[in-house]
Image: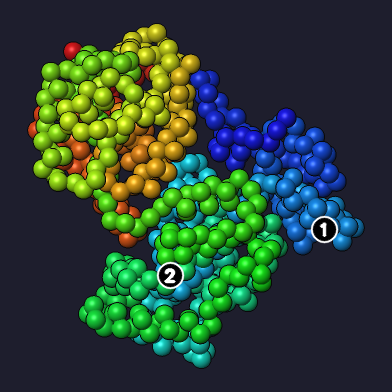
Amino acid sequence: MGIAASAGTALGEGRVGRCGVERENRSVAAAVCLSSYFWRLLCCDGLFFFPTVCRKAGLHHSSQPWCSPFAEERCKSSALANTDLTVCMTNCPTLIVMVGLPARGKTYISKKLTRYLNWIGVPTKEFNVGQYRRDLVKKYKSFEFFLPDNEEGLKIRKQCALAALNDVRQYLSEENGHVAVFDATNTTRERRETIYKFGEENGYKTFFVESVCVDPEVIAANIVQVKLGSPDYVECSNDEATEDFMKRIECYKNSYETLDETLDKDLSYIKIMDVGRSYLVNRVMDHIQSRIVYYLMNIHVTPRSIYLCRHGESELNLKGRIGGDPGLSVRGKEFAKSLAQFINEQNIKDLKVWTSQMKRTIQTAEALGVPYEQWKVLNEIDAGVCEEMTYEEIQENYPLEFALRDQDKYRYRYPKGESYEDLVQRLEPVIMELERQENVLVICHQAVMRCLLAYFLDKPAEQLPYLKCPLHTVLKLTPVAYGCKVDSIFLNVEAVNTHRDKPENVGVNRSREEALRTVPTHL
């Protein structure tokens, strides 16, 4: 009868089983905050309440529009202060508010956080106020636009902030978004109070993320990596851009009020010092906020590269069979040798090598002649009753299952097996560790590599199962300012093609030929 649930389920995301039917887990209910016991009775389905219930039902909001079992006393006081019904919502939308001076990594954090939350199935969107300004004011002139006594500039900046907040409201209240990231400086307590009230009025939980940076080297590196490539400075030399941007920072410094442990003790926030040197966390109120904190405490900005590749060609790859635990083919063993030579030539400092616990990845890693770690969570997707079958055999024995998987490959779960959605949840610890590490080589499998690649390249769930990850090819991922650079290196060892595109006809009554039209050739 507890309220714990998986991320996807807890957030109201449907899950497609073998029958291909999406089950909505969005409970239309409201609870009066009388006691923790009463709360649990109302939540007997084990799910969190859907965020738009109280808004769409037109129910009254108190000054504290949400409550959780961990904030029972707060809800009681709100109920006493108001004679109307107090609605207790745990799964309200979350408004993340960035705080900090320019060149402190706010947009870097915003984009990474948005990417991560979308990857784990939490609909999230970033709203960058700087982009609203650039859309409104087509040509940037100088730092003088940001001077505190520039009335015209101040008016435009307020206009852009309001436009962004209106879009936040539309996304969270009308488009079923779950998290909005409001990316702006928000350096004054007055501005943050305004945004907090905006969140209260609309039934959102507000969580502040402040990036404080006093290390001049980190600030300088951020200016070089990000701001000099900004549209604001396309017509400036690097020296001119740097000088102007430093003056822009000074425009904010005098009025900057950092989050304070005493003055802001009632706010929920994380304060990040020097991009991860230390952290201050205050009043984390729910599951989503705790995951945000956990993620932000794992990322870093140290230059590094992540190498992804599949195992060498296996015996079952040759025969067009999925899953199983086969060994390498002759060409697969040749690839393992080529991979060892390639890695040696790269001269990578402190490289870590990770594999699954399956024979084909271990055999590939053995050829490297270096220590490696085996991760069970890196094992290939479990195909259940279809393990070691060809696509032709699946179509013959389970034609309905074959069609249902083509209809929604991300959410479809093999009978007694896994879906890509399950795999993403399984791989979250790997993502956390990859974010903590520096140089890593991950030797994995096709479905696993697709999930990891989708995270780093910010690919949506619909595209994830169709990302191309060919055998005997290494993908070098190098994180850059607001994304990830990808280099694809084929190691000149031929292998079978295991990629199957989505067929045009995904109906359950399609012919055998239509179902198998995109199946790659094999022995």
Residue picked out by circle 1: 78
In screen coordinates, is 430 left or right of 493? right
**Position of 260 relative to 500 (above/below):** below
Residue plotted at (14% across, 22% down): 333
Q: Which mark is residue 213?
A: 2
Lower sequence index among marks 2 and 1: 1
Q: Of 367 and 447, which appears nearest the observer?
A: 367
Q: Residue 330 occupies which quadrant of the picture? A: top left
Residue 486 placement (x, y as % from top left): 24, 48
Residue 405 placement (x, y as % from top left): 42, 24
What is the image's colouring? rainbow
| Amino acid identity at mark 1 | Ser
Q: Which image quarter is the C terminus in?
A: top left
Residue at the top extreme, as displayed = 397
Q: Of 245 and 202, which appears nearest the observer?
A: 245
**Position of 90 relative to 98 (above/below):** above
Residue 127 placement (x, y as % from top left): 49, 62
In screen coordinates, is 439 left or right of 454? left
**Position of 2 relative to 203 (above/below):** above
| Amino acid identity at mark 2 | Cys
Q: Of 175 and 385, which appears nearest the observer?
A: 385
**Position of 229 relative to 456 (above/below):** below
